[in-house]
Amino acid sequence: MFTLYNVLQLTFIFIFLPFILLKIAFTPKYRQRILNRLGLHLPSMDAVDDSGPRIWIHALSVGEVMSSIALVREIRRRFPDWVIIYSTSTATGAGIARQKLGDMVDYLITYPLDLFWSVRQVVKGIRPDLFVLIETDLWPNMLGALSRRPAERPYIRHLF
């Protein structure tokens, strides 16, 4: 199934590549975030103390960010040593997350496009112990990459 999804995805990208490139070139909000969406500008997390688990919370846009504030606040209160990585897909969502959650999370990142190479790069860089998806959209490549990642701290799944 992943193979068919990726073949269709790459076919559509190839067919529409000129239009995609024009949209990126002439739309500042896409142009500014494209490298991040491709998984190429992930902040270095090597300096992070690995004694505590890493939780990655993803909220698509403004509504999801707003609905996750209480969750993030409670996780930070109950587990102050955990590293919280928070991602959004939209620039507006990122702005709200920065404003409302900036002091509660360790990293605010841009969620990658669901391309197999970009999600693999981001999952490898973040090394999450727990992934929380605050939306109803499913991202096959991301969920596949996360499920294939070896559990470094398998006990984390039993805390919630």
Image: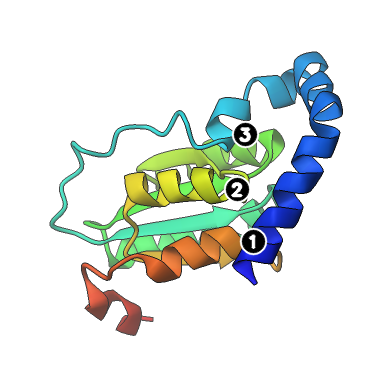
Residue at 46 percent of width and 39 percent of height: 108
Closest to the camera, between mark 2 and mark 3, is 2
- Left or right: 87 in relation to 4: left
Residue designated by label 1: 67
* Vertical relation: 99 (above or below) 22: below
Residue 5 percent across, percent down from the top left = 69, 62
For this rendering, which residue is in front, 116 or 111? 116
Residue designated by label 2: 115
Residue 122 percent across, percent down from the top left = 43, 45
**Quarter of the rendering containing residue 68:** bottom right
Q: Amino acid at mark 2?
A: Leu
> Taking the image as drawn, is residue 138 in sight?
no
* Label pair 3/1, CB-CB below 8 angstroms: no
Count of labels in the image:
3
Residue designated by label 3: 95
Query: Dot 2: what SS?
Result: loop
Q: Residues within 10 Å of mark 1 (few under 14, many from 20)?
A: few
> Taking the image as drawn, is residue 26 in sight?
yes
In the picture, the quarter occupied by the N terminus is bottom right
- Left or right: 38 in relation to 46: right
Q: CA distance from mark 3 to mark 1?
A: 15 Å
**Quarter of the rendering containing residue 154:** bottom left
